[in-house]
Image (spheres, rainbow, N blue to C red):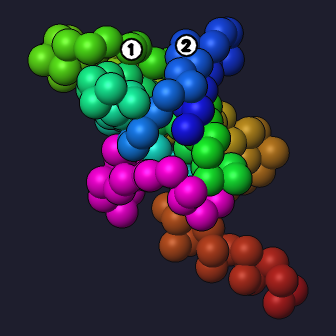
Amino acid sequence: MRLVITTPLSVIMDARDVASLRAEDDSGVFGILEHHADFLTVLAVSVVTWRDGNGAEHHAAVRGGVLTVTDGDRIEIATREAVVSDDLERLEAEVMKRFRQELGAEKAARTSAARFQLAVIRHICRYLRPDLAGRPTILRHLGEAEDELA
């Protein structure tokens, strides 16, 4: 089988003698052998492991991504970032820790951005309806209901 691992900037790996591959998605760890059915899944931040025709094991740490199997002999992984190594201990100790930290920082940044957007919306609403700015929430709704009835 052929394995191609790509990032937005480059082709990280293009191996043509892959005998088997093991990867991980949200449902767990799975394996792919030659003549596998066409397949598509979203990978977790994990280590993808494959064996070549000689039985040697190789690894790639991937920062999530999409794995596809086409025609039972072509495996493609598109990911934001990947590091290939034959030393699994180095990948697990250093690279996976970094990927997980960056993922946590991205989640925190998205949360902060969402909070900022909500604060801006609240501020705009206060600007557009200054008569409701100081009233408690329940009184605002009662005031709106009174306005509709009048």
User: Local crowd at mark 1 within 10 Å, few (<14), some, or many (≥20)?
Assistant: some
Q: Earlier in the sequence, mark 1 or mark 2?
A: 2
Q: Nearer the viewer, residue 96 or 110?
A: 96
Q: Mark 1: which amino acid?
A: Val
Where residue 80 appears, as percent x and y from the top left, is: 56, 23
In this figure, which residue is indicated by the disc labeled 1?
Answer: 84
User: Considering the image in quadrants, where does the C terminus appear?
Assistant: bottom right
In this figure, which residue is indicated by the disc labeled 2?
Answer: 12
Asked if 146 appears above or below 111 in the picture, the reply is: below
Residue 35 in view, yes or no: yes
Residue 110 colored in magenta in the image: no
At 55% from the left and 13% from the top, the residue drawn is 12
Q: Mark 2: which amino acid?
A: Ile
- Judged from this view, the residue extending furthest toward the bottom is 149
User: Local crowd at mark 2 within 10 Å, few (<14), some, or many (≥20)?
Assistant: some
At 67% from the left and 17% from the top, the residue drawn is 8
